[in-house]
Image (cartoon, helix red, strand yellow):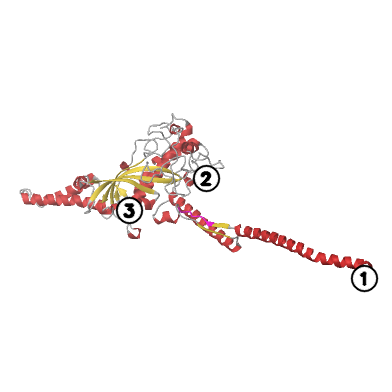
Amino acid sequence: MKPVLNWIKANLVAVICVVVVLIALPVAWFFSSRWNTEIKTEREAEVGREMQAITQARVDYTIPSYEPGGEPVSLATEPNDALTRWFKAQREQVKGQADALVERVIAFNKGEGADAQAVGRRPHTPLIERLFPAPQGDPTERFYEMEDALLGKRGRTNPYDALLKRINAGGPPDAVRVAEAVENVRARELEKFSATRQPTPEEQAEIQKKLIERRIAEYQSRARDLSVYATTAVFESDQKKGAAIPTEQLVGLYSREPARLRPMRFFLWQWDLWTYTDLLEAVRVANTGTGNRPLNIVQAPVKRIESVSAREVEGVFADPAAPDPMAGMGMGAAAAPTPAVPGGLVTDPTVSITGRTRGDWNTLYDVRRADMRLIVDSKRVDEVIRAFSATNLMTVLDMDIEQVDVWEHLREGYYYGPDHVVRLNLTIETLWLRPWTSKLMPEILRNALGVPSETDPNADPNAANPG
C-alpha cells in the first residue's frame, strides 16, 4: 500500500487530472443532456409558434354580389399571389359590369342609348337651352323663350301637338265633312226618282241603309288613317301647379310670386312634358306591329286615349294648392323602412305594390304617378300593360276595367273595329333617376326634394340604395 501512496505523491498532478477527468465525464454528460432537452424544448416551442403563425395567416378572398340578396363568392386560404391576382381581376370585372348596367339604366331613363332607341324613344332634353338649372344671360328672356316653346307661340310648334302627331293620334272625322258626304249620297239616290214619284217605303229603307253605310265608311276611313284617337283635350289644362299642360301666358301667371320660384315652375312644366311624353310613347309602343310598323286603330290594341293626367312630383307641395314648394318642407321625415331584400332598394309597402316613394332614405330617384283612361282591345290588355315597362321605368300600380257602349261611341264618330273593347282606368308609376335629373333641377327644387347640392362633397346620387 505504501509504494502506491508514494507513487501517488510522486505523480500527484497526474492523479488529480485523472480524477478530474473521471468525475467530469459523468457530470458533463448529466448537464449536457439536461441542456439538450431544454434547447430542444425551446426550439420545438419556437417552431410551433412559427407554424401556428403561418397557419393562421389566411386571407379572405371575396367577389361581392351586386344583386340584392345574392351571395358573394368567398375563399379563406393562405396568401397566394396567383389567387390575389385572379380575385382582383374578377372583382374589377364584376364591378365594371355593375357600373355599366347602372349607366345603361340611367341612359334608358333619359331616353338615350341602344335600349331607348330599340323602342323608338328620343332623349329627354330641355325645350330651351341655358335655362336649367339656372338661367344664363337675361333670366326674363329665357323664361319668355320657354313660354313660347311650351305654348307654341311665335312660330314654335306646340310640343303637345307634336307629341300627338308623333304617335299618329287624332280625333274622329270632322262632323261637318261627314254630314256633307252623307248628304251627297242622299242627293244622288234621290236623283234616281222623278219629280212625280216619291220613293216607296222599301226604297226609302234602302236609301237609309246606304246613308248609314256611308257614315260608317267615313268613320272607318278615319280609323285606318290614325293609330289612336286622342287630341289635346285629353290633357288636363286647369293650370294646377306642376300637373297640367300650360295653355296660357306663363311668365305673368305667377308674377306675384317671388322671382326665385320661376326656375322651379318652368322646370316642373318641362318635367310634365317629359312625363306625358313617356306615357304617350308607351301607347305608341303598344300600337307598333312587327317590323316597327305602326298599326291603325282597327289593328291596334289601344284604340283611344280618353284622358291622361300626371300628378305632381312627390314632395314638392304639401298639398295641390300649396303656393310655395317650401310648404312641403320641414314636416319631419318618416323613419326609413327596412329593405325587403338585403342590399336592395328601400321601399315602403304601405304606399303601393312597388313600395317606391320619396323619403330621406331615397336619394336615387323621384316618383311621379299618373292616371290614364284608355279604350283597348279586351284580348290584348296584357300587351298594353307591358308596353309601359318596355318604354321606360314605369309600372302599372292599379287597373280598373269597365264595359264600353260601342254604339254610343260610334254615334260620336269613334270606330274601334270588330274587336271587343273595354275601358282601362290605370294608375301608373314613373321613376326619374336623379343622376341625370338633379343636374337640371333649379336649386329651390333641389332643396324642396332634399337633393344634395352639386357642390356638396358628400353628394352622391348613387350612394343610397345600392340595389
**Residue beneath label 1, please?**
3
Q: Which is nearer the N-term, disc 3 or disc 1?
A: 1
The question of residue 413 being in magenta is answered with no
**Local secondary structure at mark 1:** helix
Name of the residue lying farthest toward the top: 256
Q: Secondary structure at mark 2?
A: loop
Q: Residue 220: give its label.
A: none
The amino acid on which the numbered mark 3 sits, given as a three-letter code, is: Ala
Q: Badge 3: how crowded within 10 Å, few (<14), some, or many (20+)? A: many
- Looking at the figure, which quarter contains the N terminus? bottom right
First along the sequence among labels 1 and 2: 1
The image position of residue 260, as x and y in percent, is 48, 33
**Relative depth, front residue between 169 and 384:** 384
| Image coords of residue 460 (percent x, y) | 52, 45
Q: Is residue 263 above or below residue 403?
A: above
Marks 2/3: CA–CA distance:
36 Å
**Residue tagged by mark 2?**
460
Apparent side of residue 130 relative to residue 425 in the rendered image (left or right): right
- 391 or 256: which is nearer to us? 391
Whether residue 149 is visible, yes or no, is no
| Residue in view at x 27 percent, y 52 percent | 297
Q: Marks 1 and 2, how far apart in space?
A: 111 Å
Q: Nearer the viewer, residue 365 or 154?
A: 365
Bounds of the magenta segment: 62-67
Residue 235 visible at all: yes
Tell me if residue 427 comes above or below residue 85 in the rendering.
above
Q: Quadrant of residue 370?
A: top left
Look at mark 3 in the image and give the residue it sits on: 286
Disc nearer the start of the sequence (2/3): 3
> On the picture, is 91 further left or further right than 365?
right
Amino acid residing under circle 2: Asp
The residue positioned farthest toward the front in the image shown: 1
